[in-house]
Each structure stands twice: as C-alpha cells, then as structure tokens.
Amino acid sequence: MGNSWSGLRRELENDYLCESLRGRVQYFITHYRKASDNYGRVAIRVDGKEVLMGNPFDYYLKGYVFKQGALKKEMGIPRREWTAKETLYDKENKEIEDMVYEIAVNDGVLDVYDITSAIKEYKNLDIKESINSSNPIVRMLAILDRRVGKRVLIKLMPEVENQPEWLQFFYKLRLEAENLL
C-alpha cells in the first residue's frame, strides 16, 4: 500500500474520518509472524468494541467452502483439471467461488486482504465513486468520510435498509453522529 499501517491508520482516523466520529472509530490490524503465511486479523472498533472483524479462517469456519462445494456439485461443475497445457473447468469453478465469496463479504466475513485492498481502492477513488462502489467495504469507508456531508447523508437514508446488515450499522452510526436519526 505504500504506507506503514500506523501511518495509514492515522490517516484513516484523522484525515478521512468525519469530525463527529473521531476518537470513536479505530482501525486495527495485526499479523502473527509465527503463523503460516503471516496470517493476521483486522477489526474496526467503535467506542472500544470490535464491530467488524476479519481473519482468513472465518471463511472456512463459517462453512462457505462447503457452500462452494455443494453449489458446484448441484450444478455439475467438475473439479479443475490440469492437462499440462491448460486448466479445465477453471472459469466455471471461479464463477461459483466468486459468487460465494460475495455472499460471505455481504455477511461480514472478511479477510485482512479484503480490508487492505478496499482501503487502497477507497483512497484512489473520488468520494462520489466510493459511496457508490460495488464493494461494501469501500462504501463503509466512504460513509464515515468527512467529505460526505449532511445533504448526501439525507439522500442516502433510503438506501440504508438495502445494505448488508453489518454495513447498516455504519450507516446508522454516521447518521446518528450527525443527528439525522
């Protein structure tokens, strides 16, 4: 990402976060150096309580891998097969995996990479693009952004119920912080 995590965290919490939530919202990330592949976890804390957490194991522990397998079986999609020239059935498998991954993200099952890549995307987008992003994590960062004013928040109020449940929390948090709820 170019920045150290501490610098990026400071930027998110001080430069981007709206005034009404400064000091209430904190971003947390850690990597376990003795874990395989340097795995870690990520969390967003509100008033000291972790309200959104992510680690690489939740996807497996919460059964999304089994959901992938069941869907592939139900749809008759064969396992990938390497022929020494190409991988057969890769596209079909990838479509199911992407679909289940999207379900997991909408359920709030995130990985450290999901958050860090969303932060990178968010920082490189205009705020209007961020608030309308297909990535719910980018929308979360945008809804907490100081550049989103009360008029935009009022326009977004009808959209709150259409957001994933975990994201509704952040919309409502911002709306309450601005005395709009």
Image (tube, grey):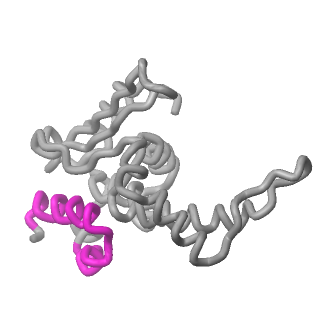
| Residue 161 in the image, given as x and y percentages of width and height | 25, 77
Examine the rendering and report whether any part of residue 129 can be seen: no
Quarter of the rendering containing residue 164: bottom left
Question: Which residue lies at the image location 63% right of the left edge and 67% below the top edge?
Answer: 95
Q: Does the magenta run of residues contain 76?
A: no
Question: Which residue lies at the image location 34% right of the left edge and 34% below the top edge?
Answer: 11
- Judge left or right: residue 60 versus residue 51: right
Q: Is residue 115 above or below residue 150?
A: above
User: Seen from this angle, which residue lies furthest right?
Assistant: 85
Examine the rendering and report whether any part of residue 100 can be seen: yes
Viewer-proximal residue among 65 and 98: 65
Q: Which stretch is magenta? A: 154-179
| Residue 89 in the image, given as x and y percentages of width and height | 75, 64
| Residue 146 in the image, given as x and y percentages of width and height | 27, 51
Viewer-proximal residue among 39 and 72: 72
| Residue 12 in the image, given as x and y percentages of width and height | 32, 39
